[in-house]
Image (spheres, rainbow, N blue to C red):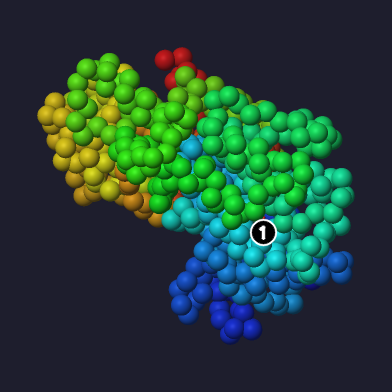
Amino acid sequence: MSKAKEKVQEDVKPIIYDSVNKTNYQRGSFLGKGGFAKCYEFKNLSTGEVFAGKIVSKSMLIKPHHKEKMFQEINIHRSLSHKYIVSLHSYFQDSSNVYIILELCSKRSLMEMHKRRKTFTVPEARYFMRQILLACKYMHDNQVIHRDLKLGNLFLNDNMELKVGDFGLATRISFEGERKKTLCGTPNYIAPEILTKKGHSFEVDIWSLGCILYTLLVGSPPFETNTLKNTYSKIKKNDYFLPISMDAAAKSLIKKLLHPDPLCRPSSEEILMHDFLTNGYIPTRLPTSCLCMKPRITHNMSVFELTKNADRKPLLESGQLPSTDAAQDIFEENGKDPGPTKALLLDGAAPKDSYLSELLAMLDSILKCNPEALYTGQPEDAQDPSAVPFVWISKWVDYSDKYGIGYQLCDNSIGVFYNDSTHIVLLADGKNLQYIDADAEQFYTMPDYPPELKKKMTILNYFNTYMNENLLKAGESARPREGDEMSQVPHLRAWFRTKTAIVFHLSNGTFQANFFQDHTKIILCPIMSAVSYIDEEKNFSVYTVPLIEKYGCLPSLTLKLNYARGMIDRLLKS
Ligand code: ADP
């Protein structure tokens, strides 16, 4: 058998035996591919526990220094045990691969969240910074420098807890005051002292934290240019710009973290004491809806903060919590007591047409490359699970000749788009409500909603019962998520039916078409440039535009994408 064939056969092995711990793992869905590794869900068949199994083919480790580097990575990583660090459960090898069994982080990383959200709210930035800092303090206390802290290495688990991962560039300090002289690899947020080869230590991680905080709040990295050369030159000159509108405490912290002299940067412990982390609201947990929608920072939360920190600078002055201002404006405008309304923050980030032009451009570039001609089969590499959608419509009922359309999102929240163009969304917890009309979005908690919504709520309950009792969920594989008072989910912005399909467009840009004849579905995400396909057998596959341009796509899917293009055009024209 040829070497290549042998490798493919190894790849498809569904049960993998760990001879060290005498355990069988079942290889599950594909999680992603890195420079050296492929990652899958691994289920321990004796305990049922699910992990992320990283598979490194030995054919990738031919040069001795590659092997050495990988075992150094494993050794550093497995010596660490902390709530906010991906835990390395075990590792083993067989004749073809090395397997690393890691804690599963199924909500991907801050990289994908940043792509979807662009900017984070200040409370979210505080929440994540605190967790990274605790991990960083632990690593540094244990003489480990990570050296490649970046959004893609900050993973998220199901509870939206952050886990620092990928110790591929990490190193251990062997004596106090040691300055490292070399680094094999290119850290993403590289510190100036690495570029000038002056010798570096723990402070390079602090520099990266400055870049991370900046990116979360501004939406792009501080030294970004078109070329690496220009970026490096800006880093060496400490040439970056802090927007005036940025939260004052964040500004002061970023200046400290991005100090050109490493010895002037604060330690993680000092940063944890900085105003940014001590003087403002830090959520104790975040809902998973934050992965694609800005959370609601409610009136209550800000009031809570103001009373809790009564002796400190009021939050409103530094503008971290615009929600309170916004709430005030709307209260005055409406001239009435908001009652149970808690937050009135509208996400102004989405473009006016809710990404319809982006969707059109995305399909144009796919269809232009003649994807059915390019298609020669379905290698796993043709898929990109990191672009997996978090929101789609899993059930719907068209009762528009009387009331409107009712739908369930995959997270179990329920929405109705009424014939009078208003919406109600009941979150998955069955408690939190969003009411949306042309002017604003209002939030209520069950059972405290205004009496004028009573009729609409009755209709919503009617739809809910009908869908629960009669309909199957599309894309069942998705784990149900809980709603939460900080959650916001997109609403159905437009929809229509043709003979072929029902078409949905959500307020976050997601486009969906359910085809009547074969029950297949496509979900398009303009932000991630992703095409997801639920086929006749209910298999869920995620492709991205660059991958389709490289590997092509199934003729049947190409046809449906062509159809979707026409429907998007129609949505744009209406
Ligand atoms: P490499 O070291 O070769 O770059 P990565 O560490 O980037 O490999 O892993 C490959 C892919 O696997 C990543 O893109 C990520 O999406 C996924 N991945 C890595 N670790 C985990 C984990 N603990 N949980 C879930 N997915 C993971």
Residue at image coords 62%, 57% = 136
Instruction: Return the x and y of residue 69 as percentages of the image width and height.
Output: 79, 66
Q: Nearer the viewer, residue 88 or 204?
A: 204
What residue sits 60% from the left and 26% below the top?
243
* Disc 1 within 8 angstroms of ligand 1 (CB): yes
Q: Residue 11: x and y, percent? A: 67, 65
Q: Quarter holding the C terminus? A: top left
Ligand 1 appears in which quadrant? bottom right
State the image coordinates of residue 355 (x, y, percent, origin top left).
Answer: 51, 25
Q: Quadrant of residue 520?
A: top left
At x 80% / y 33%, what residue is drawn?
237
Whether residue 115 can be seen here: no
- Reading the image, the residue beneath label 1 is 166
The answer to which of 297 and 55 lies nearer the viewer is: 297
**Residue in the foreground of this view, choosing between 408 and 3:** 408
Residue type, numbered disc 1? Asp
Residue under the image location 64 percent in, 47 percent down = 209
Question: For the image shown, how many numbered marks are present on the structure?
Answer: 1
- Residue 556 percent location from the top left of the image: 55, 40
Residue 403 position by quadrant: top left
The residue furthest front is: 311
Task: Please state, as top left, top right, bottom left or bottom right, where the N terminus lies in the image.
Answer: bottom right
Q: Is residue 381 above or below residue 415?
A: below
Q: Residues within 10 Å of mark 1 (few under 14, many from 20)?
A: some
- Mark 1 lies on a secondary structure that is loop
Q: Nearer the viewer, residue 499 or 335?
A: 335
Residue 15 visible in the snapshot = yes
